[in-house]
Image: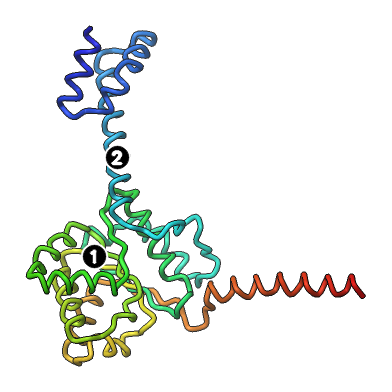
């Protein structure tokens, strides 16, 4: 009866993990003759571990990461050595505490998206709140919010994320309305929250996004200040192109072997 009461109290106090493990923990404590403080510490440690696991599950769901893009599945050997050496430190997410940014530049298909998504997963494992979103989708949402007079509320919602990963900055359609809401978003997060941006356009080409020279300069100034810049290099080949070439090579090799057999 006492155990049932303890379980009920734990549920009422929103201690679900203790309610779940109390019976087994009590049996272990009696068998190993734990002091009372050891038993209590064990229960609290289990509750903390359960809360962390539930929080990470919620954060992963809210982040909307593309499936399968983790550090384990990312081919780091393709990266220049200077970038590979940065990855362990980047995974720790210390820059987030200082509201700093990361800017990743490279040609399409070189693995920018995979890298930032993989880093985002690592940040979530360290209990940071992250949102992964394509730039055109973010801008579209901001435009709809502005049309409905809800822009401020949408910016507050986005502000709940300690990191927003903006994928493919160069693919915004570049209308004045899009430029304005994107600049507003970047300005709102400046020195308060972190932004991670991937782009196939270097800074000298950002006038294609923001068009107005003053706005372009102001946007660059905000994202570059307190930021780390990662450049994949123009000599890196597209991952998708390499995979397609390997597939074609396999098919060509099989065809050649069949023709040799027939002859």
Q: Earlier in the sequence, mark 2 or mark 1?
A: 2
State whether residue 5 is above or below residue 242. Answer: above
Q: Which residue is mark 1?
A: 194
State whether residue 122 is above or below residue 106. Answer: above
Mark 2 is surrounded, within 10 Å at the Cα level, by few (under 14), some (14 to 19) or many (20 or more) other residues, namely few
Q: Which residue is mark 2?
A: 54
Q: How is the image coloured?
A: rainbow
Q: Residue at x 32, y 39 (%)?
A: 53
Quarter occupied by residue 150 = bottom left
Specify the quadrant that holds the C terminus: bottom right
Picture coordinates of residue 251 (x, y %)? 71, 71
Quick one: 199 or 255, which is closer to the camera? 255
Quarter occupied by residue 208 = bottom left
Q: Residue at x 25, y 27 (%)?
A: 44
Picture coordinates of residue 234 (x, y %)? 48, 83
State whether residue 225 is above or below residue 150. Answer: below
Quick one: 261 or 63, which is closer to the camera? 261
């Amino acid at each position: 009866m006492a155990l049932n009461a303890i379980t009920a109290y734990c549920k009422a106090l929103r201690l679900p993990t203790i309610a779940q493990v109390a019976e087994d923990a009590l049996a272990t404590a009696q068998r190993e003759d734990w002091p009372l403080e050891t038993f209590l510490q064990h229960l609290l440690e289990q509750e903390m571990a359960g809360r962390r696991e539930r929080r990470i599950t919620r954060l992963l769901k809210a982040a909307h990461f593309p499936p399968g893009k983790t550090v384990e599945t990312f081919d780091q050997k393709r990266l220049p050595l200077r970038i590979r050496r940065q990855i362990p430190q980047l995974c720790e997410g210390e820059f987030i505490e200082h509201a700093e940014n990361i800017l990743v530049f490279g040609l399409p298909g070189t693995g920018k998206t995979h890298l930032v998504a993989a880093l985002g997963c690592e940040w979530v494992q360290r209990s940071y709140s992250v949102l992964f979103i394509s730039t055109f989708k973010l801008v579209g949402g901001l435009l709809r919010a502005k049309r409905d007079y809800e822009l401020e509320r949408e910016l507050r919602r986005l502000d709940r994320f300690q990191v927003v990963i903006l994928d493919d900055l160069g693919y915004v359609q570049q209308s004045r309305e899009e430029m304005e809401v994107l600049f507003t978003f970047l300005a709102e997060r400046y020195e308060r929250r972190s932004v991670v941006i991937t782009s196939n356009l270097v800074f000298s080409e950002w006038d294609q996004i923001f068009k107005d020279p003053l706005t372009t300069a102001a946007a660059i100034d905000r994202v570059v200040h307190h930021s780390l810049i990662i450049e994949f290099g123009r000599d890196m080949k597209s991952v998708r192109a390499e995979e397609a070439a390997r597939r074609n090579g396999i098919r060509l090799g099989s065809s050649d072997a069949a023709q040799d057999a027939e002859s």
